[in-house]
Image: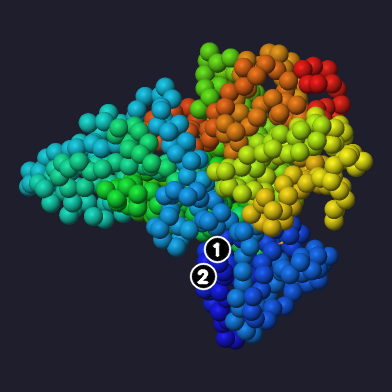
């Protein structure tokens, strides 16, 4: 059958697809990202598009599709291309494209290439990440990068010294670096004879030395000054951030970030696993999607740093949750979601970049942070390394990473326990009517006047409001409760004397921003279902903390530091987070924002063999607590579904 042309507006990007293809898939083919939290199941309603011309067919009828159609939209995931060319408009509310996420003066990705047009991270976020990381990427560890250069002058082969070339090389190397366990890959041996003879047996060897084992990355003729760069990547379920590092100077040169292109297969790791396991070629597609995301970031970094070439990147380090690590390496993640939730691997092999199709030197070594369990991954190990919680003299601390899941580590030195609570991605805006990620136009702070119920708010980049992100949702929940708009159980008080309180399509709702003040031509509201979702998310996190404390028999007071990591960064309002019962009611001074610790730990490991060694020790040392075993977590969870909690003695300072 002949392909049909689909043109996506406002970008005007065209793509040819077979009739029967759904519009979400067509957009993916065109490198246009449409929001799809449910992974194309037709249940979230976030992928609404408008058909400007052409004939389409619905995959199936549903109540949601009908409601969307009444407003003149179609669900992209449920709308199939027929036998005509199409013109499809993607409204701002459904798009994750550049115009929505970059500021006026944004330079990140702007004008670089079409492939780079989907930047999610706001330019200020990237600048902050860069500045923060440049302060001290080593965080106390010695500079001893995972790739270094050794210059050798080998004895010239002659009739008296007729050792083979490989022997000649390894003998000289053993003498120079005092290491006997050296692995030279076949691809290097294949070219070795020629290389040694280019400059009279003078060569430069690039190698990686970890735990007494040496892997040769390259052997190059002469005693040159080959540039040594590396890339550290935090592979988040939502966002992917890459750092370009100068391995010799031990510093971060630049950073780039974007959303994880796997988002079109769903917002959370379960949707991604389902896609990988159940769709034809699903694993390959999801794997290539993250490789494509990382390659886009590499391209961006190299476009900005023109003096650095792809081939100058000799080593990479990645940190991500267990599912992301599996998908990055193309490992089947099927058993991560099936009881008893066993990942295929927790420790991952070092592979060559060319095996994964990464756009760096094909022989570059790619390291991946080890995981602890199916739902505690390398990102948490990396965070534990960064905070120094495993150090001998470390005080008792709690690390909390609130992202699409809530993961935490409690302990000090040799005893560290960890768990993951399925908080769900509500704080990343998913499952919330007007929820969104921290992008341009997202409401990030909010006040509600207790007398008039008028709302004051600030948005990211001062853009016109288009939705509300995690920090705004926490503020919002705290203010809804403190002004009496909702009760402790999250129920709306519908009789309040304000037109902002009304009954909407899904029940009671409160108008946060009137239509004329938004950039989406719709009132931005929060409804009772949103509040319930947020209560479940905050309840899961707090219940996780209480469960860990219970397991080790500690009280909250014994915790010296609470490290807050993850997407919220420095934007989480701690008093409000305490007020809603998300975080424990302990002195605010004990809280420390640590930002993206996954990325920070990845940089540390790349720059220091000692840090990498410690990261692997930590992965083996962290004791995983499975929350689905026994009733402890569930009891705590149920008690946490109130604001701030059923047991108010746990929150003595919350009014
Ligand atoms: Fe289409 Fe969720 S309804 S992606």
Between 565 and 196, the residue placed more toward the observer is: 565
Quadrant holding the N terminus: bottom right
Question: Can residue 342 be seen at all in this image of the molecule?
Answer: no
Question: Can residue 24 be seen at all in this image of the molecule?
Answer: yes
- The percent coordinates of residue 151 (x first, y second) are 19, 37
Give the SS element for disc 1: loop
Q: Residues within 10 Å of mark 2 (few under 14, many from 20)?
A: some
User: Mark 1 to mark 2: distance in Å?
Assistant: 8 Å
Quadrant holding the C terminus: top right
Q: Residue at x 18, y 51 (%)?
A: 195
Q: Residue at x 37, y 24 (%)?
A: 142
Q: Residues within 10 Å of mark 1 (few under 14, many from 20)?
A: many
In the figure, 612 relative to 652: above or below? below
Q: Residue at x 52, y 66 (%)?
A: 11
- The percent coordinates of residue 426 (x first, y second) are 71, 44
Q: Residue at x 62, y 84 (%)?
A: 84
Badge number at residue 127: none
Give the SS element for disc 2: strand
Q: Dividing the image into four equal quarters, which quarter contains ligand 1?
A: bottom right
- Relative placement, left or right, of 325 versus 650 is left
In the figure, 651 relative to 231: above or below? above
Q: Which residue is identified by label 2?
A: 13
- The percent coordinates of residue 518 (x first, y second) are 66, 52
In the rendered image, which quarter is residue 645 located in?
A: top right
């Amino acid at each position: 059958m002949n392909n049909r042309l689909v043109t996506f507006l406002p970008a005007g990007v065209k793509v040819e697809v077979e009739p029967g293809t759904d519009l979400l898939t067509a957009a993916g083919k065109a490198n246009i990202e449409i929001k799809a939290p449910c992974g194309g199941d037709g249940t979230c309603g976030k992928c609404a598009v408008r058909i400007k011309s052409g004939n389409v067919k619905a995959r199936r009828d549903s109540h949601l599709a009908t409601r969307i159609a009444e407003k003149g939209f179609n669900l992209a995931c449920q709308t199939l291309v027929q036998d005509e060319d199409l013109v499809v408009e993607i409204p701002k509310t459904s798009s994750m494209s550049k115009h929505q996420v970059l500021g006026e003066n944004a330079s990140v990705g702007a004008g670089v290439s079409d492939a780079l047009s989907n930047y999610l991270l706001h330019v200020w976020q990237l600048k902050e990440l860069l500045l923060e990381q440049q302060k001290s990427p080593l965080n106390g560890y010695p500079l001893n990068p995972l790739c270094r250069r050794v210059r050798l002058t080998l004895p010239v082969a002659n009739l008296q010294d007729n050792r083979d070339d490989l022997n000649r090389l390894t003998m000289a190397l053993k003498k120079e670096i005092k290491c006997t366990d050296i692995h030279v890959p076949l691809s290097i041996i294949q070219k070795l004879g020629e290389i040694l003879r280019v400059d009279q047996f003078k060569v430069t060897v690039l190698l990686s030395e970890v735990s007494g084992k040496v892997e040769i990355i390259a052997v190059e003729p002469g005693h040159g000054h080959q540039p040594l760069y590396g890339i550290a990547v935090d592979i988040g379920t939502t966002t992917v951030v890459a750092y370009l590092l100068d391995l010799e100077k031990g510093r971060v040169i630049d950073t780039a970030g974007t959303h994880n292109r796997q988002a079109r297969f769903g917002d959370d790791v379960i949707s991604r696993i389902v896609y990988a396991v159940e769709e034809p070629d699903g694993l390959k597609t999801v794997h290539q999607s993250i490789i494509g995301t990382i390659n886009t970031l590499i391209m961006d970094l190299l476009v900005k740093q023109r003096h650095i070439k792809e081939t100058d990147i000799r080593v990479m380090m990645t940190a991500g949750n267990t599912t992301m690590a599996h998908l990055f390496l193309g490992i089947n993640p099927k058993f991560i979601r099936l009881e008893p939730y066993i990942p295929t691997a927790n420790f991952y092999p070092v592979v060559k970049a060319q095996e994964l199709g990464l756009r760096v030197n094909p022989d570059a070594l790619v390291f991946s942070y080890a995981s602890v369990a199916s739902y505690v991954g390398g990102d948490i190990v990396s965070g534990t390394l960064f905070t120094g919680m495993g150090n001998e003299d470390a005080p008792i601390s709690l690390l909390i990473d609130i992202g699409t899941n809530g993961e935490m580590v409690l302990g000090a030195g040799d005893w560290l326990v960890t768990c993951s609570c399925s908080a769900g991605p509500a704080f990343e805006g998913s499952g919330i009517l007007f929820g969104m990620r921290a992008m341009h136009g997202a409401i990030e702070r909010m006040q509600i006047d207790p007398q008039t119920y008028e709302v004051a708010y600030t948005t990211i980049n001062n853009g016109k409001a288009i939705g509300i992100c995690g920090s705004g949702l926490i503020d919002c929940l705290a203010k809804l409760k403190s002004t009496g708009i909702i009760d402790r159980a999250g129920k709306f008080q519908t009789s309040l004397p304000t037109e902002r309180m009304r009954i909407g399509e899904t029940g009671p709702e409160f108008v946060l921003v009137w239509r004329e003040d938004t950039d989406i031509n719709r009132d931005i509201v929060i409804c009772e279902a949103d509040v319930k979702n947020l209560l479940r998310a905050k309840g899961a996190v707090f219940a996780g903390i209480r469960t860990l404390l219970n397991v080790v028999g500690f009280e909250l007071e014994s915790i010296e530091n609470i490290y807050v990591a993850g997407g919220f960064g420095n934007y989480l309002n701690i008093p409000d987070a305490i007020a809603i019962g998300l975080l424990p009611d302990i002195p605010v001074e004990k809280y420390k924002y640590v930002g993206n610790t996954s990325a920070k730990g990845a940089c540390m490991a790349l720059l220091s063999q000692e840090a990498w060694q410690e990261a692997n020790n930590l992965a083996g040392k962290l004791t995983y607590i499975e929350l689905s075993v026994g009733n402890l977590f569930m009891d705590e969870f149920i008690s946490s579904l109130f604001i701030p909690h059923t047991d108010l003695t746990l929150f003595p300072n919350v009014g």
